[in-house]
């Protein structure tokens, strides 16, 4: 605990785009502690390939809104969708000011691509590593702030409450096993999704929905834990571990899905859940473990310029996408449910906020539209920071007596957390 103080103004669990954006928008004299249970660059934010959406003008609003609602099966929170869309141009300007480099044409204008579910191109990108570009630039800025302490391999195993308010959390150092309380005026849960609970997922394995279980343990409202998105196209492999995602942008640029006979069998630009259903149906019909994705229609120039990472990874796996299709299969990718939050990322517990994939603000409905996730995470994280800042100087840090004995058996604790998430997800599935 020598590197961590006992009291902070803000405790942030997670160092993805949500946690970083929150830290950047808090006052420079606020004492901030950021925790990550792995290396600082091992968040799913770094893995995002496709891009980030931006409203292209007033004429684009209606179709962008409808695309998001249709993808979400009209279960979206309309006010939240409006908030995200209308805030997108300002957020993009802020990212550019932070040094984020989006693809541009020869005249210096933004280049836009299109993905499944979108009626027109409105997605900004940086090669096929947009998440790495955005998250890396934000991390670089946060690291320059003297008021922010980032601690790796430190896990938030619980929150602390007093009189119904969140007053901090219990931290476990993963390498030493040391456990101790940290008290804070405000706490942000931004710990990512639930992919680590699945056998096949595009997520990092350490993302196991901890914040959800912690929230439920304290009676904090959660919603739609059964709303899990499956990405249609991940590289098929017999190897165990995280699945390599083949970005939806590939299909947006013209790649087609083929069955075992080499015949096209669906509209690749439909929303993800629909394409996933088509792929699974074809796999059952053909008796195969995967289908094929043909990138050759995209063209060599676009593949090498827009998708260099995908091209290189497929070569490593023995496939030259310029010459042959690649095997793909659906895998768990994103979590639309989470801890219920309002327009400012506030949970049902005072002083406790949540943002990013951990939170559920209603933007995505039952199924997320491609490239809305980074945008949504950034906007709600910034609003959380602005809301915290309103009374940050006036709020006291509250300390409470903490019994740490229940956290000694770490494996049992994690098992209980995972079971609570599964049970709630199954309960909601039955209700639906």
Image (cartoon, grey):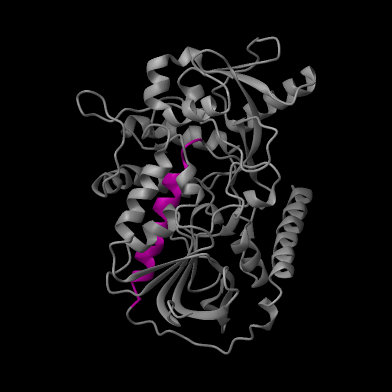
* Magenta span main SS: helix
Q: Which residues are magenta?
A: 370-392
Left or right placement of residue 202 versus residue 61 in this view: right
Q: Position of residue 131 (x, y in %)?
A: 42, 43
Q: Position of residue 420 (x, y in %)?
A: 73, 62
Is residue 388 a member of the stretch shown in magenta?
Answer: yes
Q: Position of residue 26 (x, y in %)?
A: 33, 66
Q: Position of residue 422 (x, y in %)?
A: 74, 55
Is residue 352 a member of the stretch shown in magenta?
Answer: no
When the figure is inspected, residue 331 is found, relative to residue 116, above or below; the finding is below
Left or right placement of residue 347 versus residue 216 in this view: left
Q: Nearer the viewer, residue 285 or 246?
A: 246
When the figure is inspected, residue 332 is found, relative to residue 115, above or below; the finding is below
When the figure is inspected, residue 218 is found, relative to residue 320, above or below; the finding is below
The residue located at (31%, 27%) in the rendering is: 111
Left or right placement of residue 286 versus residue 245 in this view: right
Q: Nearer the viewer, residue 251 or 85?
A: 251
Residue 171 in view here: yes
Quarter of the rendering containing residue 397: bottom left
Q: Nearer the viewer, residue 269 or 28?
A: 28
Furthest residue to the left? 107
Quarter of the rendering containing residue 214: bottom right
Q: Nearer the viewer, residue 373 or 318?
A: 318
Residue 164 in view here: no
Total count of labels: 0
């Amino acid at each position: 605990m020598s590197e961590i103080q006992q009291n902070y103004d803000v405790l942030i669990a997670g160092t993805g785009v949500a946690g970083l954006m929150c830290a950047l928008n808090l006052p420079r004299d606020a004492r901030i502690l950021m925790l990550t249970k792995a290396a600082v660059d091992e968040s799913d934010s770094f893995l995002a390939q496709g891009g980030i959406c931006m409203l292209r003008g007033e004429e684009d609003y209606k179709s962008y809104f409808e695309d998001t609602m249709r993808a979400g099966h009209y279960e979206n929170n309309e006010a939240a969708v409006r908030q995200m869309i209308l805030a997108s141009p300002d957020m993009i300007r802020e990212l550019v000011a932070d040094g984020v480099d989006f693809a541009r044409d020869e005249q210096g204008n933004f280049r836009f691509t299109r993905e499944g579910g979108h009626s027109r191109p409105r997605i900004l990108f940086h090669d096929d590593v947009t998440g790495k570009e955005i998250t890396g630039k934000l991390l670089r800025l946060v690291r320059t702030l003297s008021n922010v302490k980032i601690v790796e391999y430190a896990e938030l195993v619980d929150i602390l409450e007093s009189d119904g308010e969140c007053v901090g959390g219990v931290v476990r150092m993963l390498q030493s096993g040391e456990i101790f309380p940290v008290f804070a005026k405000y706490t942000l849960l931004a710990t990512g999704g639930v992919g680590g609970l699945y056998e096949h997922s595009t997520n990092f394995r350490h993302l196991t929905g901890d914040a959800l279980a912690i929230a439920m343990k304290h009676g904090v409202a959660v919603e739609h834990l059964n709303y899990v998105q499956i990405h249609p196209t991940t590289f098929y492999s017999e190897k165990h571990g995280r699945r390599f995602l083949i970005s939806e942008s590939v299909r947006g640029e013209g790649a087609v899905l083929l069955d075992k006979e080499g015949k096209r069998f669906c509209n690749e630009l439909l929303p993800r859940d629909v394409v996933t259903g088509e792929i699974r149906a074809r796999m059952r019909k053909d008796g195969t473990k995967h289908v094929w994705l043909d990138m050759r229609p995209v063209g060599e120039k676009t593949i090498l310029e827009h998708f260099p990472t995908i091209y290189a990874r497929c070569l490593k796996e023995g496939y030259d996408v310029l010459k042959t299709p690649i095997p793909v299969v659906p895998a768990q990718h994103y979590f639309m449910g989470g801890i219920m939050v309002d327009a400012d990322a506030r949970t049902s517990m005072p002083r406790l906020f949540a943002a990013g994939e951990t939170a559920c603000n209603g933007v995505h409905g039952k199924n997320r539209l491609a490239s809305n996730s980074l945008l949504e995470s950034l906007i709600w994280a910034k609003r959380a920071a602005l809301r915290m800042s309103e009374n940050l100087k006036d709020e006291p840090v509250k300390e409470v007596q903490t019994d740490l004995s229940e956290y000694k058996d770490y494996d049992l604790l994690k098992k209980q957390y995972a079971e609570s998430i599964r049970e709630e997800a199954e309960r909601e599935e039955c209700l639906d």
